[in-house]
Amino acid sequence: MQETPEKLARRFGLLKGILPLDRASALRDAFAGITLASMDIPQVLGYARIAGMPAVTGLYTVFLPLVAFAFFGASRHLVVAADSATATIFSSQLSTMAPLASAQYVALAGMVALLTAVLLLVARIFKLGFLADFLSRTVLVGFLAGVGVQVGIAMLGDMLGIAFTSSHSTAQLAQIASHLGQVSFPTLAVSAGVVVCILLAKRFSPRLPVPLLAVVGGIAASDLYDFAGHGISILGPVAGGLPPFRLPVASWHQMVELLPVAASCFVMIVAQSAAAGRVFAQRYHEEVDLNADILGLAVANTVAAFSGAFVVNGSPTQTAMAERAGTRSQFGQLAFAGVVVVVLLFFSRYLQYLPHCILASIVFTIAIGLINVQSLRAIRRETPGEFTLAVITALAVVVLGVEHGILLAVVLSLLRHVRHSYRPHTMMLAPGAGGRWQPVPARPGTQTAPGLIVYRFGADLFYANDHFFVEDVRALIGQAPSKVRWFVVDASAITDLDYSAARSLNDLLDLLKQQNVEVVFARVNRYLRSDMDRHGITEAVKASCVFSTMHEALAAVGVTPQVSTPGVI
């Protein structure tokens, strides 16, 4: 029996982001894809500007890479195209290796895309999709805010008509301050008009494609009124037609230099794509297959490398735009790619009249959107410590550069997790109002009841934090108001016990046994019990002193719990 095309696609893991698709859904997504094209084409032109690439390569990113992800990816919503974060990451390094938009620069950008594709393919083979979880949302917000500030500063040059000679944000600000007398007022007027119109439209009519209108209007006005002759810089000749297919060429030394850049792009792609894919999948109650999406991203970046484009990413911003436009599957993205083909074949020659300041103004508004003030306020209100991490990340991006910023973001995310495990919260039950027990921070000099301390350690026990556990226990027992007979360990937060911690715990148990203190473990789960059995802890405290509930543990020491907070026992 011959299989249908849909069954063949499912067998080979293709078109997961499109199928199933009926006629009505296809028509809906096709029209939505055309709407998305009207909003997104000016953005990808702007992203090419951020990347330091020829403007037409922005269109290349929403043609073959978009189609490749539609075939190999799994997300029905993710828009894979040029993105400001990844564009900034590789342009900061490439600008020191070759002149912007030159043939050598384009080849190096293609090599970054190819190296990024290799890293993504390795991640897919070894199912490393979980790596996305190591970049916390807090530092990601800070990183994107830093990228927004950096990109915004970089665009000010074109918006003011001032040529920058440095790629560093601090140097660019210094150049603006020292060249204010050289500002081109016609350029500034056009830039201000575009920015104001886009921001007002976002506030009052978000569906109106103002960036596209600005591009079309700017091209027409530039041609009609000879903007170039009035000191307003324009793009100049733009290559038309479909993207050329060629292998990006770079020396071995250059590839070694580009590998850290590709690694930074890889981290950002996995983190952003996973976040965007999950958000919209959950919104529509769909399954998430992150490893399939990583394969789709690997193929998309491979295609980008061979088609004269640059690194593509699952963009949260463009994915949100697609959702607002009405797309519910990758078929809408295929319609978008179809519109791009028409532009490349018939309209690209008109791009030569597009003023740089209009493109920079569009990118400037995109950069402003990357600074999520609402999220930063929420982080500051709820967790001031994490807000500090976000601000440090943002400052690192602006001052040190994007590549160092993304590495710092990963390190800070990991350190934040390690810090909570290294120095966890510790609690104990102590008498409160009316003599009833309530959870309080563990402090020497208090006890739960005469002869009893109930203590909770808030993380797994491992080689780095076992001494905190030992010090806490010894201090609580040594400074208790009365002789401690029973020490109950609430192990609800402990799921793992490594060899080093087990040795420290055994030594502590021997010491407490000499002091006639009986240690009881409560709320011991099966994973911890297995570790306790293997390391001899169960034998040291006797199996009769290891319990799965707190009630059983307190009953064993002959104490009736007196709690005022539900769920404590």
Image (cartoon, rainbow, N blue to C red):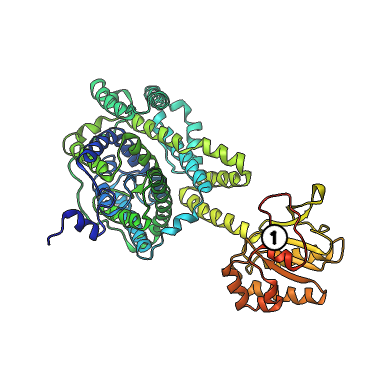
In the image shown, does 28 or 258 lie closer to the viewer? 28
Residue 151 position in % (x across, y down): 43, 39
Q: Amino acid at mark 1?
A: Arg
Which residue does the numbered mark 1 point to in the structure image?
456
Q: Is residue 460 above or below residue 379?
A: below
Residue 43 position in % (x across, y down): 33, 36
Q: Is residue 221 left or right of residue 422?
A: left
Residue 168 position in % (x across, y down): 47, 43
Query: In this rendering, does residue 471 appear at all?
Result: no
> Which residue is located at x 43 percent, y 27 percent?
182
In the image shown, does 253 or 366 lie closer to the viewer? 366
**Which quadrant of the rendered structure holds the N terminus?**
bottom left
In the image shown, does 37 or 260 lie closer to the viewer? 37
Q: Is residue 135 left or right of residue 70?
A: right
> Which residue is located at x 54 percent, y 44 percent?
395
Query: In this rendering, does residue 453 appear at all?
Result: yes
Residue 290 position in % (x across, y down): 38, 55
Circle 1: element type:
strand
